[in-house]
Image (cartoon, helix red, strand yellow):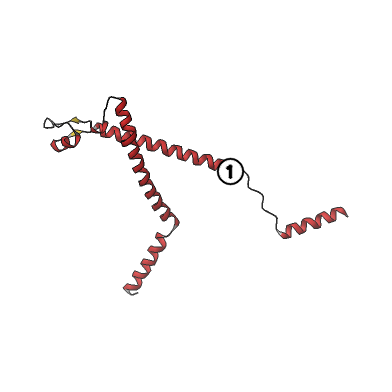
């Protein structure tokens, strides 16, 4: 088998693999998931955390840290990380709140989808129309009953 024949066959197999429904669905899911993650990150960083900060007197959790070295004297997290080891617990708290919000929103979406699915299942589908042969046999049966 020539090299170009193997390459052509491999390219064809790859194209068949890539065009399967599951791979395309997975790619769409990853893209939508990334976009959804950006929306939730913005919701947490731009809406929820400022509200929490205002309620707690202007606190911004993402910049809270505990120095683990005596060399760290900076007042903000970015500069403190440059000076030495820090425990960025405020950033961890922000990411934890972010995760809880994502999990809750996904719970609500899945719950709504399950309700819609149950509603569709509750409505029985109309029985299929009998075939022409069954209709004919039914007519013959009914005529025989009358005689």
Crowd rating for badge 1 (residues with CA inside 10 Å; few <14, some 14–19, many 20+): few
| Viewer-side residue, 46 vs 122 | 46
Q: Foreground: 49 or 64?
A: 49
Residue ID for mark 1: 121
Q: Judge left or right: residue 68 versus residue 40.
A: left
Specify the farthest residue to the bottom: 2
Place of residue 125 in the rendered image (x, y in percent of width and height, measured from the top left): 63, 47
Towards the viewer: 119 or 130? 119
| SS label for mark 1 | helix
Q: Residue at x 77, y 58 (%)?
A: 137
Residue 131 figure quarter: bottom right
Residue drawn 31% across the image and 32% down it: 49
Quarter of the N terminus within the rendering: bottom left
Q: How many marks?
A: 1
Q: Residue furthest right?
A: 147
Q: Quadrant of the C terminus?
A: bottom right
Q: Residue at x 76, y 59 (%)?
A: 136
Percent x, y of residue 31:
37, 50
Quarter of image, res 103: top left
Please report the residue visible at 45 percent of the width from the left and 56 percent of the height from the top: 21
Above or below: residue 14 compared with residue 75: below
Residue 11: name its quadrant.
Answer: bottom left
| Residue furthest to the left | 71
């Amino acid at each position: 088998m020539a090299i170009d024949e193997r390459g052509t066959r491999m390219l064809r197999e790859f194209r068949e693999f890539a065009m399967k429904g599951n791979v395309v669905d997975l790619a769409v899911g990853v893209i939508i998931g990334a976009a959804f993650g950006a929306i939730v990150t913005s919701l947490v960083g731009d809406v929820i955390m400022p509200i929490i900060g205002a309620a707690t007197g202007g606190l911004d959790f993402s910049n809270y840290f505990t120095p683990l070295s005596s060399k760290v004297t900076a007042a903000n997290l970015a500069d403190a990380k440059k000076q030495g080891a820090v425990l960025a617990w405020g950033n961890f708290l922000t990411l934890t709140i972010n995760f809880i919000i994502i999990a809750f929103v996904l719970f609500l979406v899945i719950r709504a989808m399950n309700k819609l699915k149950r509603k569709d299942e509750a409505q029985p589908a109309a029985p299929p129309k009998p075939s022409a042969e069954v209709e004919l046999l039914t007519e013959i049966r009914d005529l025989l009953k009358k005689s």
